[in-house]
Image (cartoon, rainbow, N blue to C red):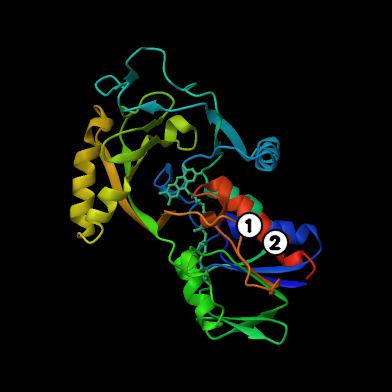
């Protein structure tokens, strides 16, 4: 089969790898400059900063086996087994209050990626036909297959189609193809995230192991150097959904200033050398579809996937992509 995949985030990449392994021809289109989607890493001078997903966990055995392969290949590594919490951190010293650290918190491994989370996407994209800077503008049926049209009016025909954008974006594409998604699915809402990236002149005050949860405003504070991906001290601050929604329409400069003030206790004695704001409109799905992917009744050549299907995290995106590939390969 010739299969087109819309979106080269983790779902799309895992769908592609699964299809290629079964001998199918795959082309992926992504509107971004490089594959990865929310597996996003930015270079700021000599600093390397994860500004989307920060780490991943394994709950499913198949995903755990996949992560083991990534670790064996030298791509991923176990970062820690739990994070500090704001309640236990002494922000004056940067040490954890009881002096022992909480990095072994709940005993479950948190994995990171050498060179930043986006390096996992680059690894998975090796040997794939990934066409970036390619916005899919419309989808239509073409005989027994599918036609996707890019915003430069070029078209690509295929026997099967996997769509892995966040659901609201998928909905508008499928609308043009007159494919009706169930209302409960197309109404999937996403939380927004406003993210502050701060490069410091010395170590900040994020306690061991360089990740912290439970702050009043930030769902996660990450120290990219302590994590092992950055040569320079650089912190990531993800504001929570309520805060991000309330400040979404504020001018970016004022949001950056406000976030910087809120983050200041975690800078310790360090000066901020550079700061940037990242806005994630579709950060986290608020509801999860009960199946790992969706197909219209009786149409096996189309599957819709993404983290709104198998869970709002790296693991869910990967499993959903694999499920979508298997769905379009299964006989009618
Ligand atoms: C701020 C933040 C923090 C997070 N932290 C964690 C974490 O610590 N741990 C964890 O497990 N998960 C985390 N997540 C969630 C995790 O990143 C996602 O679940 C996962 O990366 C989603 O992958 P995906 O392939 O489903 O979607 P995406 O990565 O969003 O991929 C979809 C792709 O579709 C492309 N696209 C959309 N529309 C079009 C179009 N019309 N044409 C072409 N391309 C299109 C986009 O460019 C994108 O690359 C976080 C997410 C965010 C935003």
**What x and y, as percent, mark residue 259?**
23, 45
Q: Position of residue 33 (x, y in %)?
A: 50, 64
The residue lying at 31 percent from left, 36 percent from top is 200
Ligand 1 lies under 8 Å from the Cβ of mark 1: yes
Residue 42 in sight: yes
In the depicted view, which residue is nearer to us: 40 or 9?
9
The residue at which mark 1 appears reads as 321
**Mark 2 closeness class: few <14, some 14–19, many ≥20 residues within 10 Å:** many
Q: Is mark 2 within 8 Å of ligand 1?
A: no
Kindly state the secondary structure of the residue where label 1 is placed.
helix
- Judging by the rendered image, the residue that carries numbered circle 2 is 325
Residue 32 can be seen, yes or no:
no
**Residue 2's image quarter?**
bottom right
Instruction: State the image coordinates of residue 82 (x, y, percent, origin top left).
Output: 47, 27
Callout 1 environment at 10 Å: few (<14), some (14 to 19), or many (20+)?
A: many
Q: Secondary structure at mark 2?
A: helix
Left or right, 225 with reference to 197: right
Image spot of residue 212 (x, y percent)? 37, 31
- Identity of the residue drawn at 52% across and 45% down: 117
Residue in front for this viewpoint, 52 or 166:
166
Residues at circles 2 and 1 in contact by the CB criterion of under 8 Å: yes
């Amino acid at each position: 089969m010739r299969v087109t995949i819309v979106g080269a985030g983790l779902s799309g990449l895992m769908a592609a790898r699964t299809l290629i392994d079964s001998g199918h021809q795959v082309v992926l289109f992504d509107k971004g400059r490089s594959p990865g989607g929310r597996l996003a890493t930015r270079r700021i001078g000599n600093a390397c900063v994860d500004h989307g997903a920060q780490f991943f966990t394994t709950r499913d055995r198949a995903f755990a086996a996949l992560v083991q392969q990534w670790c064996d290949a030298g791509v991923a590594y176990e970062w820690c087994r739990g994070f500090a919490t704001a309640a236990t951190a002494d922000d004056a010293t940067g040490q954890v209050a009881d002096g022992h650290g909480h990095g072994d918190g709940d005993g479950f491994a948190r994995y990171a990626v050498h060179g930043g989370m986006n390096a996992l996407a680059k690894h998975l994209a090796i040997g794939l036909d990934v066409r970036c800077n390619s916005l899919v503008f419309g989808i239509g049926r073409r005989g027994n297959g599918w036609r996707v049209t890019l915003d430069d009016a070029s078209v690509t025909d295929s026997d099967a189609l996997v769509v892995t954008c966040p659901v609201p974006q998928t909905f508008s594409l499928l609308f043009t193809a007159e494919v009706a998604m169930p209302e409960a699915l197309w109404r999937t809402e996403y939380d927004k995230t406003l993210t502050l990236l701060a490069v410091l002149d010395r170590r900040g005050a994020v306690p061991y192991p360089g990740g912290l949860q439970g702050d009043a405003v930030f769902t996660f504070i990450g120290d990219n150097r302590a994590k092992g991906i950055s040569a320079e001290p650089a912190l990531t601050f993800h504001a929570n959904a309520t805060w991000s929604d309330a400040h979404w329409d504020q001018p970016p400069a004022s949001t950056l200033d406000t976030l910087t003030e809120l983050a200041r206790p975690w800078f310790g004695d360090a000066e901020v050398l550079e700061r940037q704001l990242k806005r994630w409109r579709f950060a986290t799905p608020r509801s999860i579809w009960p199946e790992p992917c969706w197909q219209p009744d009786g149409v096996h050549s189309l599957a819709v996937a993404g983290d709104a299907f198998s869970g709002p995290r790296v693991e869910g995106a990967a499993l959903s992509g694999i499920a979508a590939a298997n769905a379009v390969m299964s006989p009618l």
